[in-house]
Image (tube, rainbow, N blue to C red):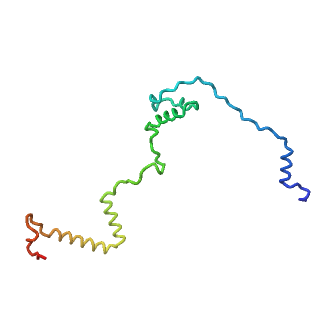
């Protein structure tokens, strides 16, 4: 049954050879309408509201077109950053954390790491040190360190 059938590729090749060659259809060429050429406005006089379409004509010098586009894109309307562009902003400099929030963060960290008992003990010792520091007599101006009563010279 398969012996009397022609193989797929053989059949395809035979049909391809038998098919008459047809020339490829050429695409229709649309000729541009001849418009009277408008004189270009000087680039220095361009404003964002000006008409930039004459500068987009393919016959205009690319340098002049580039200068006109540069003038157009200096407008603040086109100079806005895209908020959804991930690399459009500098995130390396941030606002400093307020002191009150920083204290709360450090307290939560200490509480989680050291535990409540150890933290309470450290706070009690810090308060005692502060009270002892305040109870010390202030130095008398003009008194030499060597003349402090109760101090032994080494």
Identity of the residue furthest to the top in this view: 36
Residue at 49 percent of width and 33 percent of height: 68
Residue 36's place in the image compared with 74, above or below, is above
- Image quadrant where residue 74 sits: top left
**Residue 95 placement, left or right of 60:** left
* Tally of numbered tags: 0
Does residue 44 appear left or right of residue 143 in this picture?
right
Q: Position of residue 139 (x, y in %)?
A: 11, 66
Task: Note whether 128 is above or below 53 in the view shown.
Answer: below
Q: Residue 85: horizontal and vertical position, in percent?
A: 48, 49
- Quarter of the image that includes the C terminus: bottom left
Please tell me whether residue 90 is drawn above or below residue 48 in the rendered image.
Answer: below
Q: Nearer the viewer, residue 47 or 128?
A: 47
Percent across and percent down for residue 66 are 51, 35
Identify the residue at horizontal 50%, vertical 29% (top origin). Answer: 51
Query: Looking at the figure, which quarter contains the N terminus?
Result: bottom right
In-image side of 55 versus 114 (left or right): right
Residue at x 76% of width, y 36% of height: 25
Which percent across, then down, holds residue 132?
17, 71
Front-most of 19 and 125? 19
Task: From the viewer's perspective, tell me whether residue 127 is left or right of residue 15.
Answer: left
Which residue lies at the image location 81% right of the left edge and 39% below the top edge? 22
């Amino acid at each position: 049954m398969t012996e009397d059938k022609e193989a797929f590729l053989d059949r395809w090749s035979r049909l391809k050879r038998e098919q008459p060659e047809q020339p490829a259809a050429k695409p229709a060429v649309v000729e541009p309408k001849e418009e009277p050429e408008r004189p270009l406005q000087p680039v220095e006089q361009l404003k964002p509201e000006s008409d930039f379409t004459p500068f987009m004509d393919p016959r205009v010098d690319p340098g002049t077109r580039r200068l006109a586009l540069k003038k157009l894109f200096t407008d603040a309307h086109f100079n806005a950053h895209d908020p959804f562009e991930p690399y459009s902003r500098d995130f390396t400099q941030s606002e400093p954390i307020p002191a009150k929030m920083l204290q709360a963060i450090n307290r939560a960290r200490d509480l989680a790491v050291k535990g409540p008992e150890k933290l309470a003990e450290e706070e009690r010792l810090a308060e005692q040190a502060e009270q002892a520091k305040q109870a010390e007599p202030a130095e008398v101006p003009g008194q030499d360190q060597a003349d402090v009563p109760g101090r032994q010279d080494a």
